[in-house]
Amino acid sequence: MTAPAPEGGRRPRIVAFIDEEGRYDYVALQAVERAADWDGTLILYDSSTASPFTEPIASDMSAEGEGDQFGDPLRADELHRLGRPAIASRVEEARERGIDAWGWLPSEQGVDGFLKYGDEQEADLLILPAELADGVVRDVEPERVVGPGRPPGRRVEGAAWIMLIEPAGRREDQE
């Protein structure tokens, strides 16, 4: 489920790695700013929901029809129904600013799941905490990591740009 694209193509799509506890609020703030600048679609990926023991959203293996109740990505009302008011509130706040904002509750843990989800959503930009860079930069072509003087744009050769954010809100590569 995605928002209708404006004339000339779909909106740029941004997926941001956040958590319910607020540890990565600085990532959410940067993602909202980027989505506002781009008039883009923003998906807040709640990294704190993944667990090896439970599914945050009913799957096809759950009771019949349960998995069909929710979209991908999730609306704020769906996040509330799933018991995730903190993420729902962030989505609502972004929507109040005019951003096409959504949330997602992954079942796969870690950055690998985030990268996979971003690819599934055909994201143009993935935003995540710089402290997680080791696991990302090691496995990703260096040219995909956003650097100064090279602002991100649309997907390049089918791959999203990656922006690493420091707690102060600066991109890691800005000195």
Image: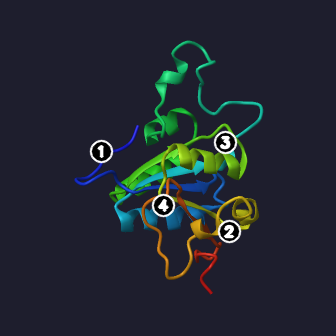
Quadrant of image for the N terminus: top left
Q: Say which label, 1 or 2, has the lower sequence index.
A: 1
Q: Which residue is mark 4?
A: 156
Type of amino acid under label 2? Ala
Residue bearing mark 3: 49
Q: Is residue 77 above or below residue 9?
A: above
Instruction: Determine the secondary structure under disc 1.
Output: loop
Determine the residue positioned at 26% across, 52% down. Answer: 6
Q: Earlier in the sequence, mark 4 or mark 3?
A: 3
- Vertical comparison of 51 with 92: above or below: above
Q: Which residue is painted at 59% across and 40% down in the image?
A: 105
- Judge depth for marks 2 and 4 and give the one in front: 4
> Relative to 92, is 32 above or below?
below
Q: Dividing the image into 4 quarters, which one contains the C terminus?
A: bottom right
Q: Residue at x 56, y 77 (%)?
A: 147
The answer to which image quadrant residue 129 occupies is bottom right
- Structural distance between the alpha carbons of marks 2 and 4: 22 Å
Residue 130, label in figure: 2
Near mark 2 (Cα within 10 A), the count class, few <14, some 14-19 or many ≥20, is some
Residue at disc 2, secondary structure: helix
The answer to whether residue 86 is seen in the rendering is no
Q: Position of residue 9 (x, y in %)?
A: 29, 52
Q: Quick check: marks 2 and 4 in contact, CB under 8 Å?
A: no
Q: Amino acid at mark 1?
A: Pro
Q: Which mark is residue 163?
A: none
